[in-house]
Image (spheres, rainbow, N blue to C red):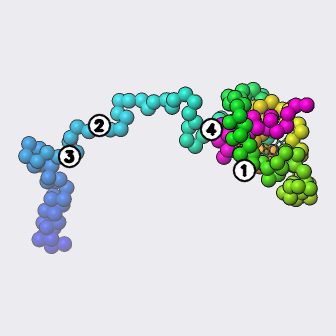
Amino acid sequence: MSRARQLALLVGLAFATSACWEQVAPTWFAQMKEQVAVQALEGHQPFDPPQGTIPLGGMEPRIDSPVPAFMPQAMALVNPVPATAASVERGKVVYGIYCKVCHGDDGMSNQAQVPVARRLSESGMPPPPLQAVPAYVDGFLFTKIRYGKPGMPGYPQIPAEDRWHVVNYLRKLIPRN
Ligand code: HEC
């Protein structure tokens, strides 16, 4: 490298690394990066979610068991939704969307009336008539809807409150006799 080139390189490097604008007195040109800035939540803790809210992306804690509905923590769940006429009505709507296709209008999974029940029985897993519902506690039914069982799909996408409405509706549909 010629001397002239070496010199040019040195001058260039000196210029590039000297951060020349830093040498302008801040009294002349204030720099934005030196302003007082308050960062989001600086000095604050985030609030806890208000009581009774369901966090985005999560609902009840997951029950890790092959048979979640039979676990004590499932059975112990207390139905927080009173079985008002409005609740039963909402439960009926949700049942109509998700359950009727296999268990039929009356919950009896009648294969003569419910084509999907017939097909499932041909493949060896017929949906049973829901006669046993009165024998189950609310927490069992609620959890059973969430996780399903080998022969029945789980419905975690039904919001918890709607699942309680379905439970209330099942109690009306299949009363204890
Ligand atoms: C794809 C068909 C299908 C759909 C949809 C379905 N089920 Fe089932 N269900 C089954 C089958 C099959 C069984 C029996 C095997 C089992 O328990 O896994 C069953 C079992 C049940 C039982 C237990 C019955 C007993 O005697 O132990 C209940 C309660 C029940 N379903 C409620 C519901 C509710 C409520 C919905 C709607 C949220 C629903 N099911 C949606 C197929 C279905």
Q: Which residue is mark 3?
A: 32
Looking at the picture, which amino acid does disc 1 mark?
Ile
| Range drawn in magenta | 157-177
Res 97 label: 1
Looking at the picture, which amino acid does disc 2 mark?
Val
Position of residue 85 measured from the top left corner of the image (x, y, whole percent): 71, 34
Compute the Cα span from label 2 to label 4: 34 Å
Res 59 label: 4
Residue at 44 percent across and 32 percent down: it is 46
Q: Quadrant of residue 45?
A: top left
Compute the Cα span from label 2 to label 1: 49 Å
When the figure is inspected, residue 92 is found, relative to residue 139, above or below; the finding is below
Mark 4 near ligand 1 (CB under 8 Å)? no
Res 46 label: none
Q: Quick one: label 2 or label 3, which is nearer the N terminus?
A: 3
For marks 2 and 4, give the one nearer the viewer.
4
Q: Which residue is mark 2?
A: 38
Residue at 23 percent across and 37 percent down: it is 36
For marks 3 and 4, give the one nearer the viewer.
4
Q: Nearer the viewer, residue 33 or 83?
A: 83
